Image (spheres, rainbow, N blue to C red):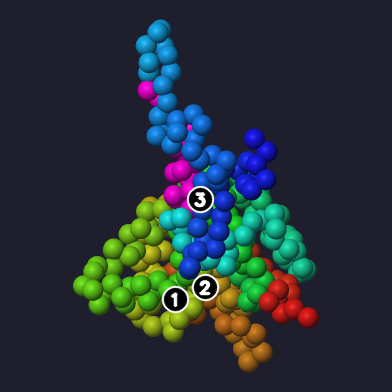
Amino acid sequence: MNCRKCGDRGYLIEMGDETAVAKVCPCRSPCPKCADTGWWMELVDGRPISKPCDCRHLRRHVSRYNDTGIPARMHRCKLENFEDKGGTQGEVKAHLKLFRQAFRPGNRGFLLWGPPGTGKTHLACALLTYFTLERGYTARFQDFFHLLSDLKAAYALNRSEDAILGPLVDVDILVIDELGKGRATEWEISVLDQLVSRRYNAQKTILATTNFDVTDATPGPDTPIARLVDRVDSRIYSRLREMCDFHQVDGPDWRKRG
């Protein structure tokens, strides 16, 4: 078809008000095979048989991407356009390409850690884009601080925690962005513990990012950043260690230009 808009992928991604939005490319809509009905007719032994059209897969994948909640500013993120500016960025990018190729739901995930501005969220969103639109998996992107806000809003409306946490447990892949962000109160820790524990018990994949140190070094006066284990509790940290490979993303802060 050689579509210049979508590169024959069949979908386009745009920046919405708060989240990135995918849509079926005009080159695939209306579907030339079924006219967007989702079904087409085939003659078998002279009798018309209704069959599902392949375009249903594309529309389902687009819908799953739109359910993910990837931030609007991350709508262009792909592994292929992630710039290696130094440090460990190129090494991590290469590793995630292999992770993407071999991934199946339930596989061991990863946790990207390092200073702000090194591309951790870009990498996580790039994988969610691929897994939803190309592989059709269900996924959610969840900023931990926003999760806490959503729970407080739910309480105000007399809604249960499960109305918020349930969808995060059920999806094939969950990204927890800014892990450890917040005030590390007892309530915040209990929310994270419930989410991680439920996905752990269900053998569901977690991908995560954090600005905190994940090494086991004893903090001292010259320690540059706080430790994640001190922000999320040792029980949660232990389960994350079992569920995820930890990768340091180090290098120049891409937000600092000029």
- Between the residue at mark 2 and the residue at mark 3, the CA separation in whole angstroms equals 28 Å
Q: Position of residue 178 (x, y in %)?
A: 52, 73
First in residue order: circle 2 vs circle 3 = 3
Q: Nearer the viewer, mark 2 or mark 3?
A: 3
Q: Residue at x 61, y 70 (%)?
A: 113
Badge 2 vs badge 3, beta-carbon distance below 8 Å: no
Q: Residue at x 75, y 64 (%)?
A: 84
On the picture, is 161 further left or further right than 250?
A: left
Badge 2 vs badge 1, beta-carbon distance below 8 Å: yes
Mark 1 secondary-structure assignment: helix
Hey, what amino acid is under mark 1? Phe
- Which region is colored magenta? 50-65
- Between the residue at mark 2 and the residue at mark 1, the CA separation in whole angstroms equals 8 Å
Is residue 213 visible in the rendered image? The answer is yes
Residue 145: give its label.
Answer: 1
The residue pinned by badge 2 equals 178
On the picture, is 160 further left or further right than 6?
A: left
Q: Position of residue 125 (x, y in %)?
A: 56, 60
Residue 23: give its label.
Answer: 3
**Is 100 or 81 nearer to us in this picture?**
81
Q: Position of residue 204 (x, y in %)?
A: 44, 53
Where 224 sits versus 52, above or below?
below
Outermost residue, bottom side: 221
Q: Residue at x 48, y 68 (%)?
A: 18
First in residue order: circle 2 vs circle 1 = 1
- The part of the image, by quadrant, that contains residue 162 is bottom left
Hey, what amino acid is under mark 3? Lys
Q: Residue at x 35, y 72 (%)?
A: 150
Hey, what amino acid is under mark 2? Glu
- Between the residue at mark 1 and the residue at mark 3, the CA separation in whole angstroms equals 28 Å
Q: Nearer the viewer, mark 1 or mark 3?
A: 3
Tell me if residue 53 is in the magenta stretch.
Answer: yes
